[in-house]
Amino acid sequence: MSAYGGYSKPAYGAQGGDDSGGFFAGGSQQGSQGGGGGGKSYQDESLRPVTIKQILDAEEAYAGADFKIDGSPVTQITFVGQVRNVNPQQTTITLKLDDGTGQIEVKKWIDGDRPDDALPTYEVDSQVRIWGRLKSFNKRHVGAHVIRPVSDPNEVNYHLLEAAYVHLYFTKGPLGGANGANGEGDSMFVDGGGYNDQAGGNASQANSKLSGCSAPAKKMFTFMNDTPGGNEGIHLNVITNSTGMSVRDVLTGADELLGQGLIYTTVDDETWAILEY
């Protein structure tokens, strides 16, 4: 299982992420459960930590093609930025973010099918982390799946170091590797895709995040952790039927676990898998 930037490849390797917040590749749903046919496969998805300058400089061979950064295809991205402007509307919220390397707009759609959803508020000059997909409709922007406030200022520094580390991997090869991107040996990168915390620090980080979660989120996470779901993950109906949790509790727990980076969506917005540390 490949990993880079501290995120294992199927980790946030959810299917796509268009502006509607669902994970779709190229604006059409990909990889439905048990489905066949062409299109981008689940294994082609990955999450890469980037800076806004890298987003703005990303190459697009033609409209609708995969973006490339450092010559490598980019599907989903994560970055940290400071809020410069907030434009809330009835069904969407648009933020202009600045990370010191550039500025870009981030758009997140509010799910109108969930009446309990409230339009989130973000303070100007606050820091947020984005998980989403790069878009070029009309102008280049990011369609966000998750927007999470940054409470620890060290996360900003950590992210910039992480983005630089992954950039060096793609441009210089893995640390200690003998054959560039395919090097092995004592490299911190594994499976040609990134780096992995071999000391087990990531597992401790997962436990620390889970300890601050609500009871429904912990119950959902425990069930998913004990139930192999494969790359396609576990659907909402399976979780409710197996645990006795209500649909509302599962959706609330899922939002919480997504925000903590403990799970990710796979074939649709109601199918999740655990981020493997």
Image (cartoon, rainbow, N blue to C red):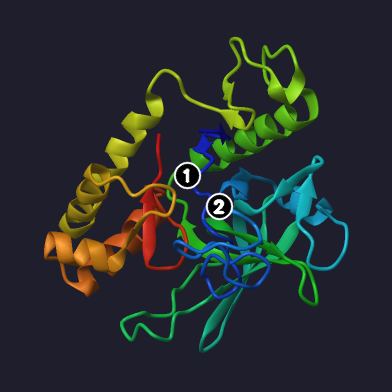
Tell me which label, 1 or 2, sits earlier in the chain: 1
Q: What residue appears at the point 79 percent right and 30 percent down from the top-left corner?
A: 171
The CA distance from mark 1 to mark 2 is 11 Å
Residue furthest toward the right?
A: 61
Judge left or right: residue 96 versus residue 1: right
Q: Judge by depth and name the residue closer to the eye, 254 or 190.
A: 190
* Marks 1 and 2 in Cβ contact (< 8 Å): no
Q: How would you rate the neighbour count of disc 2 (Cα within 10 Å): few for under 14, some for 14-19, many for 20 or more?
A: some
Quarter residue 19 falls in:
bottom right
Residue furthest toward the left?
A: 244
Residue furthest toward the front?
A: 36
Residue under circle 2? 42
Quarter residue 106 falls in:
bottom right
Under circle 1, the secondary element is: loop
Under circle 2, the secondary element is: helix
Quick check: 243 above or below 164?
below
Residue 192 appears at what percent x and percent y?
A: 64, 28
| Circle 1: residue type | Ala
Q: Is residue 92 visible?
A: yes
Residue under circle 1? 11
Residue 269 appears at what percent x and percent y?
A: 43, 68
